Image: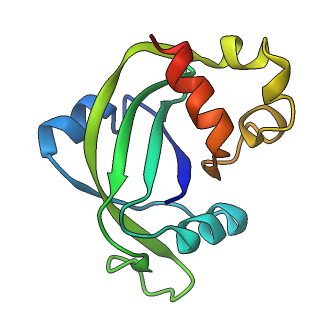
Amino acid sequence: MAFWLLKTEPSTYSYGDLERDKKTTWDGVSNTLALKHIRSMKKGDLAFIYHSGDEKAVVGIAEIISNPYPDPKQHDGKLAVVDLKPKGKLNAPVTLAAVKARKEFAQFELVRMPRLSVMPVPASLWKTVLTMSK
């Protein structure tokens, strides 16, 4: 199982929307590196849902419930999507400021490449974020 972080603008689609909808197709990604990461996902992987914009915090966990497939809304074979469902809200959001304050996150894409919308999360950092959310 791999771990991921998916960014979303909460005014467009929030973790609360995912809980309400019970599942969604994660689409709208066009960045080449972000698409490479989506194509690397597998059914059963877990992803942090990160609210961008004013919040800038990890707020919940989702499970990837499909392997990647071509975006059915687009006519571009390069665009890939996955389906996901909510697993649970974090007890407390983990802010970008809190992540940046810890040296173990210095090489994490969230810190190094802040505009990237889909990124892998090393297992050790996944555990650290979960601990920080308690």
Q: Position of residue 23 (x, y in %)?
A: 20, 53
Residue 50 vertical placement versus 96 (above, below) = below
Q: Position of residue 105 (x, y in %)?
A: 78, 28
Q: How is the image coloured?
A: rainbow
Instruction: Quarter of the image for the C terminus: give it.
Output: top left
Q: Is residue 61 left or right of residue 8?
A: left
Count the marks: 0
Whether residue 54 is visible, yes or no, is no
Question: Residue sitting at 50 percent across and 86 percent down?
Answer: 76
Question: Residue sitting at 74 percent across and 36 percent down?
Answer: 114
Q: Position of residue 29 (x, y in %)?
A: 53, 61
Residue 50 vertical placement versus 66 (above, below) = above
Quarter assignment of residue 2? bottom right
Question: Residue sitting at 79 percent across and 15 percent down?
Answer: 102
Whether residue 128 is visible, yes or no, is yes
Q: Is residue 76 left or right of residue 85?
A: right
Q: Nearer the viewer, residue 52 or 111?
A: 111
Question: Residue sitting at 56 percent across and 14 percent down?
Answer: 132
Q: Is residue 86 left or right of residue 71?
A: left
Residue 56 vertical placement versus 115 (above, below) = above
